[in-house]
Image: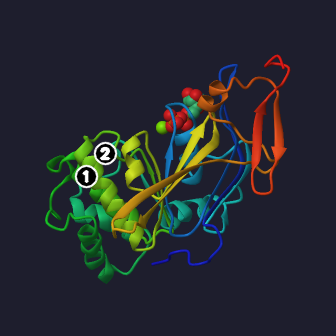
Amino acid sequence: MTNYTETRPVIVCDGLVKIYKVADLEVVALQGLDLVVEPGEFVAIVGASGSGKSTLLNILGGLDTPSAGTVHVAGIDLLNMTPRQRTRYRRSVIGFIRQQTSRNLFPYLNAVENVELPMIIDGRPSREWRGRAMELLDLVGMSHRPRHRPHQLSGGEQQRVAIAVALANGPSVLFADEPTGELDEGTSSEIFETLKRVNETGTTIVVVTHDPLVAQHVKRTVAIRDGRTSSETLRWTEVDEQGEHRLMAEEYVVLDRVGRMQLPHEYIEAIGLKNRVRLTLDPDHVNVWPDREQRGE
Ligand code: ADP
Ligand code: MG
């Protein structure tokens, strides 16, 4: 395994901007996105359709470049890679899983051959191929179907094999863009359990999803809104007096480098905040009050 073992963050995105030009029109897909992921984390990225999730993941996966900002993965500056380094990055520093099950596997290769292919391309010794591929199929719960070709497998089974393929060269980070987008609820849940098991072996995972149920599977959910990280939910389990494990969750708003944050819409509406708010500082927290004039005081 070539897992990134340093204690520094494995992903650092700083002020990422991505502008797509379509004819005379500019689409701002990311507008100053910040994200830090520590080694070993399992992070889910959620957000409405069009919020910039795929754009972010394609940049992190080395498939696209940002218009501005910086991005480092496993200590590598993604904006300063030679074509050769980019190929190596995509082949062995990271693993990538797409939503479309059919795009992750070669149709004319069976499951174990699909997992071996990245190792062959990476120039690993041939004696490692079969054993390692079978180990990975075992990890994702597919060691009973090594000779099945993709069309002989269900969508969920194909995604499991895709996870094994993505892990073939021992990447530091696994990226998955809506890996369960084409699957039913039960199968999606199984895929997330599989990803959890992979994460427990030490691989950092960043998965994009629109499925609110993923919340139950990951410790950290990052919400993207309008091309920026807007809020985060952290989850952990606590043991109460009766010895019962309870799932705890706390929502955080993201504060950017210059101190800006976005208040949730419900809060703004609940007390009619508008244009101007009053801030007061207490020893351990900050209060936000409506403008006195607006309330007619
Ligand atoms: P998500 O994955 O969250 O649904 P995307 O990252 O795919 O969002 O898209 C973010 C925005 O960028 C959308 O407005 C989308 O239409 C636009 N966009 C994405 N890819 C392209 C592209 N290749 N050319 C032009 N606009 C794009
Ligand atoms: Mg998308």
Residue under the image location 34 percent in, 55 percent down: 192
Residue in front for this viewpoint, 223 or 120: 223
Residue under the image location 72 percent in, 48 percent down: 255
Find out whether the residues at labels 2 and 1 contact each other: C-beta distance under 8 Å: yes
Q: Amino acid at mark 2?
A: Thr
The residue singled out by tag 2 in the image is 101
- Is ligand 2 closer than 8 angstroms to the Cβ of mark 2? no
Q: Name the residue furthest top.
A: 296
Which sits earlier in the primary sequence, circle 2 or circle 1? 2
Residue in front for this viewpoint, 4 or 44: 44
- Looking at the image, residue 60 sits to the left or right of residue 243; the answer is right
Where residue 125 sits in the image (x, y, percent)? 37, 81
Residue under the image location 67 percent in, 26 percent down: 271
> Which mark is on residue 158?
1
- Binning the other alpha carbons within 10 Å of mark 2 as few (below 14), some (14 to 19) or many (20 upward) gives many
* 26 up-or-down from 205: above or below: above
Where residue 197 sits in the image (x, y, percent)? 34, 67
Separation of disc 2 and disc 1 at Cα?
Answer: 6 Å
- Res 195 visible: yes
- Binning the other alpha carbons within 10 Å of mark 1 as few (below 14), some (14 to 19) or many (20 upward) gives many
State ligand 1's quadrant.
Answer: top right
All told, the count of numbered labels is: 2
Q: Amino acid at mark 1?
A: Gln
> Residue 55: which quarter of the image?
top right
- Looking at the image, residue 6 sits to the left or right of residue 221; the answer is right
* 249 up-or-down from 143: above or below: above
- Circle 1: element type: helix
- Circle 2: element type: helix
- Looking at the image, residue 112 sits to the left or right of residue 35; the answer is left
Where residue 221 sits in the image (x, y, percent)? 51, 51
